[in-house]
Amino acid sequence: MAKVNVGPKISIESADWLSEKFGTRNAGAAFAIEIFPSIFESTIGELRGRFEKAELGMILDVENNDLKEFLKGSPSPEIKNSVFQAFNLYPGVYEKRWKVDGKTLNKKLSSLSLFQEFCLKLWVCWYDESVGFDSYVVSMLLPGQDGFKALEPPKSKIL
């Protein structure tokens, strides 16, 4: 398999950690970058079928941002906190708009691992309105389905 060079800038702390765990930061970065697509797809597979269409709609509504905005800050998942905050700041509004049960959605989001929440955040960031809500969300409704095109980041949003 042909290889290409990439040169992301990372924090000193991350570089030190990669060096410590993998021998060199380049070896660690290469491993992390190579493994990410498969563990992302696997994790999205775990999330398929967990949420109702309306719940995903509310998540997309509350998390209305794109990948560039997400990566400007610290890449940490915020979906759970954003949804909790939306329910608290606007009691009944999101439940009525999306016809969701806030307690049920909060419980589902609370059950996610940190990495699952991070992958869901990326899925949200890659939402492309031109694809359409129904077409995009269907990929998350069917348990065990892999390889949906909607999960690939749109070319226009790649940094």
Image (spheres, grey):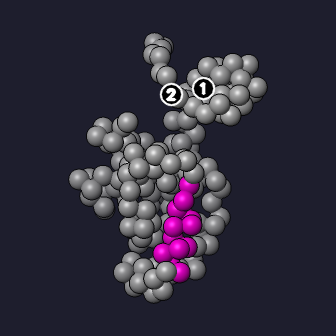
Disc 2 and disc 1: Cα gap in Å? Answer: 9 Å
| Proximity of marks 2 and 1: CB atoms separated by less than 8 Å | yes
Residue at horizontal 37%, vertical 42%? Answer: 153
Residue 8, which numbered label?
Answer: 2
* Amino acid type for the residue under numbered disc 2: Pro
Nearest the eye: 29 or 132:
29
Q: Where residue 80 sits: x, y (%)?
A: 56, 65
Nearest the eye: 145 or 22:
22
Range of the magenta residues? 77-88
SS for callout 2: loop
Quadrant holding the C terminus: top left
User: In this view, which residue lies farthest toward the top?
Assistant: 2
Taking 112 as reference, is 40 left or right? Answer: left
142 up-or-down from 24: above or below: below
Circle 1 is placed at which residue position?
A: 29
Query: Mark 2 against mark 1, which lies toward the viewer?
Result: 2
